[in-house]
Image (cartoon, coloured by chain):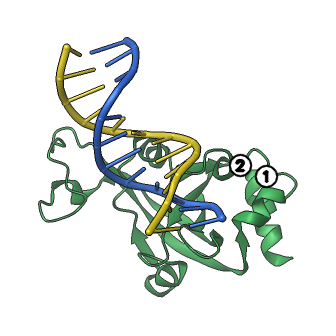
Chain colours: A green, B yellow, C blue
DNA sequence: GCCAACGTTGGC
DNA sequence: GCCAACGTTGGC
């Protein structure tokens, strides 16, 4: 099983939205590194749910991959801001996955906390901030979960 | 709202 | 295939 971190702006889709709906599809990823990470996901992989553009930003919950990567339908929707004229049905450019709600953390683990926490020095969210779907090690995942209980 | 860092596009 | 110009992300 693998671990990931996925970012969402709470104004657009928050952990409370996921808690209410139970599961969602992660549409709108239009970055190749992030897309490639989604294509590596397997059902059952665990996901740290991160609020970006929030005050403060940080990990607020845990989700689980419930459906492996499949073509993001919005890439063919002319009316969508995620429309991509260069993507064909034969060779879809963009993927999405489904994730389901697991838990909301008892307290958020802010980016500031992660920056100073022992064991998270190599975390991608610290070293390469902008990537919206990124791998997390099992150890990093556990450290974040422990911080949420502290 | 600013802007640094980073990704993508497209001319050559 | 390089790289300048441009667009976006996301912390602050």
The verdict on a common chain for dots 2 and 1 is: yes
Q: Residue at x 11, y 60 (%)?
A: A78
Dot 2 alpha-carbon crowd within 10 angstroms: few under 14, some 14 to 19, many 20 or more: some
A55 vs B11, left or right, is right
Q: Can residue A106 be seen in the rendering of this structure? A: yes
| Nearer to me, A84 or C8 | C8
- Residue A11 appears at what percent x and percent y? 45, 79
Q: How far apart are the two marked residues, 2 and 1, measured between alpha carbons?
A: 5 Å
* Chain letter for the residue marked with disc 1 in the picture: A
At mark 1, the secondary structure is: loop
Residue placed farthest to the bottom in the image?
A20
* Chain letter for the residue marked with disc 2 in the picture: A
Q: Quadrant of residue A143?
A: bottom right
Q: Quadrant of the C terminus of chain A?
A: bottom right
At mark 2, the secondary structure is: loop
User: Residue A123, which numbered label?
Assistant: 2
User: Residue A120, which numbered label?
Assistant: 1
- Residue A47 appears at what percent x and percent y? 59, 61
Q: Residue at x 15, y 45 (%)?
A: A89
Q: Are marks 2 and 1 in contact (CB under 8 Å)?
A: yes
- Residue A33 appears at what percent x and percent y? 46, 41
C2 vs B5, left or right, is left
């Amino acid at each position: 099983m693998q671990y990931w971190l996925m970012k969402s702006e709470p104004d657009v889709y928050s952990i409370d939205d996921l808690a209410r709906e139970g599961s969602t599809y992660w549409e709108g990823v239009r970055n190749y590194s992030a897309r490639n990470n989604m294509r590596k996901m397997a059902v059952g992989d665990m996901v740290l749910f991160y609020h970006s553009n929030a005050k403060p930003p940080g990990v607020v919950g845990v989700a689980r991959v419930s459906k492996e990567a499949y073509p993001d339908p919005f890439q063919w929707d002319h009316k969508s801001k995620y429309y991509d004229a260069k993507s064909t049905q034969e060779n879809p450019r963009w993927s999405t996955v489904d994730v389901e709600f697991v838990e909301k953390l008892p307290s958020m683990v802010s980016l500031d906390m992660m920056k100073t926490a022992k064991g998270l020095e190599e975390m991608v969210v610290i070293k390469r901030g902008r990537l919206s779907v990124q791998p997390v090690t099992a150890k990093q995942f556990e450290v974040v979960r422990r911080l949420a209980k502290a």
